[in-house]
Amino acid sequence: MVTTVRSRSQSGLARTFDTLNPATSEVIGTFPIFGEDEVNDAVARAHEAAAWWGKLGWKERQRRLMAWKSYLIRYIGRLSELVHTETGKPLADAQLEILLAIVHIDWAARHARKILGPQRVRSGIVAINQASCLEYQPLGVVGVIGPWNYPVFTPMGSIAYALAAGNAVVFKPSEFTPAVGGALVSSFAEVVPDYPVLQLVTGLGETGSHLARSAVSKIAFTGSATTAKKVMAACAENLTPIVAECGGKDALIVAADANLDAAADGAVWGALSNAGQTCIGVERIYVAQDIYHTFLEKLAERVSALRPGDDREADYGPMTMPGQVDVIEQHIADAVASGGRAVVGGLGSIRRPYVGPVILADVPESSSAVTDETFGPTMTVTPVTDLAEGVRLANASRYGLGTSIFAKNKKAAMQAARALRSGMTSINSVISYASVPALPFGGSGESGFGRIHGADGLREFSRAKAITRQRMKPLVNLTAFTRTDADMKKILSLATILHGKRYQ
Ligand code: NAD
């Protein structure tokens, strides 16, 4: 949680802000607000660092990234305490998030050379005299703007891959989690003390806006679609490219033949873990009519057993961002006013800063509880005739981030997964794709564009460089003013043989 900004004339950086523990409202720390000049200075330093880091080579970068990974796992206790204090999430969830981030650092470090390093490509018959080479070079400096809900895992999806690709990074964490951001940056400096390859700039939205307008080579933004539009507009001024990882309204579809216990377990975790503050959290559940009531009973039984709190036994924590509770309240109210019913909880579940779990059934598809990102511990459950209708309703959203399907029939599940317009789908589990570092992660529509993680994530932070080297003189030189009509005739005859076959 962030308190009001304070002016502090005696400090080097004129203004500061405090972060609060969302459960207790205690002040966790005071952080500087980086202004335009400070952000530009950090980016200038990052360009120097990028020149060094880029020249280090794959092996040396890999060695340092592996050392960072090892440092993070050895100090996971401290970092997870900090994540717990700043976001309010249970300690075990904080540890899980850090473990996943470590898996991604490891994968990016190990695979960067193979995916981005120089590779020969076939030149083809027209350019048979050329040796062709493709490689992916670093962009320079990547500005990473992060959210608060997974303050280690989420920005790491950009930071680790940008670093492994040979870039320096300037990281602006969310104003709700600057201490976690600071811990990530200082841990990297422990293993790479030579240059400021990963730097921290703290502040509110304005600091992010300065970063988007600075001399960065690319912005990796994670946050809401509303902010992404502002960041894109700022990036447009310098034609700075951007990868945007935004929100979602993820659907889970339960087919008639699904294992209902597994589906209910998955739905509960997907919707309620981290108090529902997960971009790929389950917000809408579509259930085949035949098993709708049985599934709803199983779901309600599990959900009723869970409770939020700050104690070690609590299943999930408080809402990290106080303002989000208003959105949750409005969505529950709209769902009920438009004909839906609260099967578990309801408006009474809101006890700031906590929100108890809520199941909303039979809510019309036009309600904001179905159309907009709630980002809270709520879910809507709706009957559908079959998988196909589930897919149709899941796709009828302006978001397209993640989805899940529970079904026994493998072929039908795969077919439905392919038809879902989301960037990622997990079958018979929830959110699993995020733990597979080789798989790309990202959305479409209001969920953003571009990809982090996997080979696509490495390429996202590099520029393709194509090189041809003439190995021998061409048989016919078409790109010279000495070219003759006979040369052209020869090449057209060859092209007709190669490409002129009739296709039915
Ligand atoms: P947010 O959009 O409010 O803020 C995100 C970041 O942008 C913060 O660091 C903020 O300071 C900065 N910012 C705000 N205004 C800015 C501006 N004008 N210019 C530049 N930067 C600016 O989002 P949030 O509340 O921190 O995060 C929650 C949202 O993030 C949800 O919508 C969630 O679904 C989404 N999210 C998406 C993913 C993903 O991978 N797709 C992951 C986590 C969270």
Image: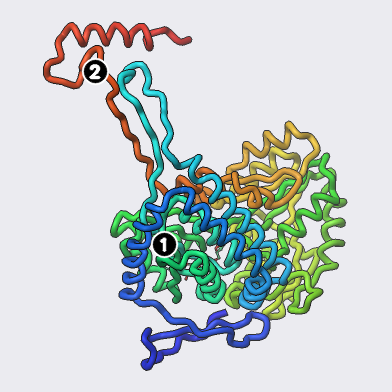
**Rendering coords of residue 10 (x, y %):** 37, 93
Left or right of residue 472: residue 309: right
Q: Say above or below: 111 vs 2.
A: above
- Disc on res. 143: 1
Left or right of residue 498: residue 299: right
- Secondary structure under tag 2 reads loop
Q: Residue furthest left?
A: 481
- Secondary structure under tag 1 reads strand
Q: Say above or below: 129 vs 385.
A: above
**Rendering coords of residue 313 (x, y %):** 81, 74
Q: Residue at x 78, y 73 (%)?
A: 314
Q: Residue at x 44, y 85 (%)?
A: 16
Question: What colouring method underlies this structural image?
Answer: rainbow
- Disc on res. 473: 2
Q: Say above or below: 392 vs 130.
A: below
**Rendering coords of residue 455 (x, y %):** 52, 43
Left or right of residue 425: residue 452: left
Type of residue at label 2? Lys
Label 2, residues with CA under 10 Å away: few <14, some 14-19, many ≥20: few
Quarter of the image holding residue 406? top right
Type of residue at label 1? Gly
Q: Nearer the viewer, residue 46 or 174?
A: 46
**Rendering coords of residue 128 (x, y %):** 33, 18
Q: Is residue 62 visible?
A: yes
Q: Nearer the viewer, residue 342 or 273?
A: 273
